[in-house]
Amino acid sequence: MSHLPNLDHYWLPFTANRQFKSMPRLFKAAKGNYYTTIDDRTLLDGTAGLWCVAAGHGREEIASAVAQQLRTLDYAPAFQNSHPLAFEAAERLAQFMPQGLDRIFFTGSGSESADTALKIALAYHRVTGNPLRNKLIGRERGYHGVNFGGLSVGGIAGNSKSFGNGLAGVDHIRHPLDIARNAFTRGLPQDGGIALANEFEQRITTLHDPATIAALIVEPMQGSAGVVLPPVGYLKRLREICDKYGILLIFDEVITGFGRLGTTFASDYFGVVPDIITCAKALTNGAVPMGAVAVKREIHDAFMSNSPANAIELPHGYTYSGHPVACAAAIATLDIFTNDKLVERSAGLSGHFELAAHSLKGIPYVKDIRNMGLVAGIELEPTPGRPGARAFATYLKCYEMGVLVRYTGDVIAISPPLTIEKHEIDRIFSCIAEALTELAAEGE
Ligand code: PLP
């Protein structure tokens, strides 16, 4: 057992801090698909950290690129100056993006990427002579980080209700989850996609003037709110509606980017190209904070051609935009994706993963199982009057048994590193089954 630090000063994000202190779950090392905890347990990482460590932990290539970069150029001013690696990282990332989205703005996180994307969308309409396009549309259950823009277009009341009104001019459309109709569907729900997308058109034409809508932002697969999958045809229809009314479509691919669904981006999976893609997390394999926003070249060029010479085209940026160390980590990570064929690996494992996830059907409390690529959501019957308590208890039991899972509301979310082995996938789901069976036996 390593030394337990003083737990008084650090305020953990999104955590019941008092509960945590009674059972601190601290990691001291990680390698491959495993964490080592401070009390020397080994934990199989069923969550790729927080959806970010796609290439497995402790990658030497990233560590040495970061160390070398720190020794060579630790920081360069991000405004009015830069450094070559930022341009190289942007060029490399553009090669991973769907065709045409090859202009890159760097940020420090997924939340910053969401707010940056929203700001670019609003500003784009202004530079192209449409200043009345001020409204932003998100979705119920959407998660676009915790900054005010992302929080406002997000649709998880638990995240926003403590923080006042958020942005004005925001509306939300329905999320696609329909357990009554689709429980235990393997992969995408087959029905209802077009009708659901048509509700977007109905809403903007009856409750708004579509000419006032700047952008629609969606996660192609809603991860944080419990793995909500888009029905077949849904995203394509949203694209058509956006095109019809001149609305920009933003895909938040912070989770779905970099192979999670078995394609490089979800956009590739669905064959739907948005105008803007946000990403973060696996961009640096979680090793260094970084996010990015990829925009269609026309959007970028509209700023460049419509502003007077010497003007700042987009008055937006972060001290750490294009940070040299983050860029070094990103380039090393993108190299790993290419060299280790991680996207192909993810696609190759997805069939086994689906079978393993759906083996939980019939286990106590399992109400629905949703899966796609290397993501699964196991939705549990909630304990009456205590939403989320059963999922939390399951997470704790799995932790005790040596498997790290994630809980969000009443859903256990699984998203292992793309380096996971089949026997490890089996272990994750059998551990969840065992935990739930135990909980049922205890009457919890
Ligand atoms: N967008 C999506 C879809 C996410 O899942 C997340 C985080 O999980 C974010 C944005 C926020 O990213 P970050 O926590 O890096 O700010």
Image (cartoon, helix red, strand yellow):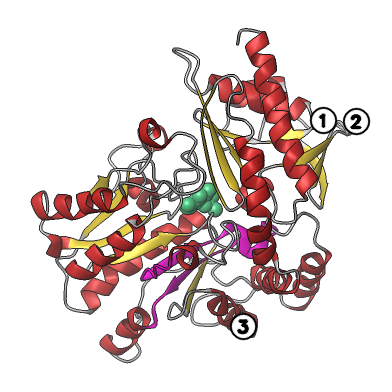
Where disc 1 sits, the SS reads loop
Q: Which residue is tagged 3?
A: 88
Q: Position of residue 360 (x, y in %)?
A: 62, 30
Instruction: List the residue tagged with mark 2.
Output: 1
Does 248 sit above or below residue 200? below
Whether label 1 touches label 2, CB < 8 Å: yes
Q: Is residue 100 left or right of residue 261?
A: left
> Disc 1 vs disc 2: which is toward the camera?
2
Specify whether tag 2 is near ligand 1 (CB below 8 Å).
Answer: no
Position of 39 compared to 328: left or right?
right
* 281 magenta-colored: yes
- Quick one: label 1, few (<14), some, or many (20+) residues within 10 Å? few
| Residue receiving disc 1 | 4
The answer to whether marks 3 and 2 mark residues whose Cβ atoms lie closer than 8 Å is no
The kind of residue tagged 3 is Glu
Q: Is residue 281 left or right of residue 156?
A: right
Q: Which residues are magenta?
A: 271-297
- Identify the mark nearer the N-term, 3 or 2: 2
Q: Amino acid at mark 1?
A: Leu
Q: CA distance from mark 1 to mark 2?
A: 8 Å
